[in-house]
């Protein structure tokens, strides 16, 4: 069973999501929240596998709630799926930087929503890396890091880990990276997991953000 927490400040949207998820096999709704502060409390109390998080809420936003939940959660941390109206949204970019696993448009159909919950609940990527790349390219070059914090030290990575990170940020899947580097897909996953551990990252999307912000990949220089 995938344990899900639903967060949205609009009651009708939240109720619709809860009803849809409760009717789906293999999913258990463990709680719901109407704002970011309540989401932080519910996440600590219910230990969900996946959190559907509205991005724009009064008070504590989805960005801040995502940051706090991931900072405070014991392993394994929940995977946070951002709900948004627009995919090219700087708020979504900030949420990915904070560690969200991906994002989903609010007008996505029920099948897409359930597939997304199943994907992130199972530890898979939500969408093609190129989608994350398109969003990151739109904002990385003109958005500073929170509090002017320095970027992670990618010099701690091995040459192969750096190359896997670069190709990931260029929009390549694990299988495509494996083919290009003549290694197994499992080895690609190992390198990426080690990279995320060394850089203290919570998601693949966050790794793409870091690759751009450190200059490892530049906007316009990635693969289409």
Image (cartoon, rainbow, N blue to C red):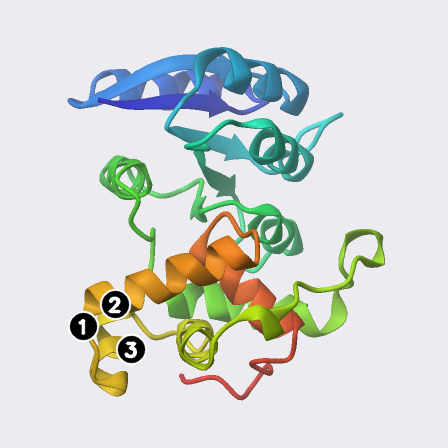
SS at mark 2 in the image: helix
In this image, 11 relative to 59: left or right?
left
Q: Earlier in the sequence, mark 3 or mark 1?
A: 3
Q: How far, Cα to Cα, is label 2 from label 3?
A: 10 Å
- Above or below — where is 87 with respect to 83? below
Which residue matches tag 1? 184
Whether residue 216 appears in this view of the structure is yes
Contact between marks 2 and 3 (CB within 8 A): the answer is no
Q: How far, Cα to Cα, is label 1 from label 2?
A: 5 Å
Q: Nearer the viewer, mark 2 or mark 3?
A: 2
| Number of residues whose C-alpha sits closer than 10 Å to that of mark 3, classed few (under 14), some (14–19) or many (20 or more) | many
Q: How far, Cα to Cα, is label 3 from label 1?
A: 9 Å
Which residue occupies 67% across, 30% down? 57
Which residue matches tag 2? 187
Q: Position of residue 171 (x, y in %)?
A: 39, 74
Q: Quadrant of residue 139?
A: bottom right
- Above or below — where is 166 with respect to 187? below
Which residue occupies 42% across, 65% down? 131
- Above or below — where is 151 with respect to 119? below
| Number of residues whose C-alpha sits closer than 10 Å to that of mark 2, classed few (under 14), some (14–19) or many (20 or more) | few
In this image, 49 relative to 68: left or right?
left
Which residue matches tag 3? 177
Pick the front one: 169 or 186? 186
What quarter of the picture does the N terminus occupy?
Answer: top left
SS at mark 1 in the image: loop
Whether residue 128 appears in this view of the structure is no
Q: Position of residue 88 (x, y in %)?
A: 56, 60
Contact between marks 1 and 2 (CB within 8 A): the answer is yes
Which residue occupies 18% across, 23% down? 26
């Amino acid at each position: 069973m995938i344990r899900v927490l639903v967060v949205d400040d609009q009651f009708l949207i939240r109720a619709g999501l809860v009803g849809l998820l409760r009717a789906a096999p293999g999913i258990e709704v463990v709680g719901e929240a109407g704002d970011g502060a309540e989401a932080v409390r519910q996440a600590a109390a219910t230990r969900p596998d996946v959190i559907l998080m509205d991005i724009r809420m009064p008070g504590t936003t989805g960005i801040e709630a995502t940051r706090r939940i991931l900072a405070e959660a014991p392993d394994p941390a929940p995977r946070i799926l951002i709900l948004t109206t627009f995919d090219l949204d700087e708020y979504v970019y900030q949420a990915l930087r904070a560690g969200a696993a991906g994002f989903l448009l609010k007008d996505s159909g029920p099948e897409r929503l359930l597939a997304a919950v199943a994907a992130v609940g199972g530890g898979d990527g939500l969408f093609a890396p190129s989608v994350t790349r398109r969003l990151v390219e739109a904002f990385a070059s003109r958005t500073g890091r929170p509090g002017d914090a320095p970027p992670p030290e990618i010099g701690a990575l091995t040459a192969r880990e750096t190359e896997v990170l670069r190709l990931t940020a260029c929009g390549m899947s694990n299988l495509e990276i494996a083919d290009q580097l003549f290694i197994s897909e499992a080895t690609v996953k190992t390198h990426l997991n080690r990279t995320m551990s060394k850089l203290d990252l919570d998601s693949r999307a966050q790794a793409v953000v870091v690759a751009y912000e450190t200059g490892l990949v530049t906007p316009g220089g990635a693969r289409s």
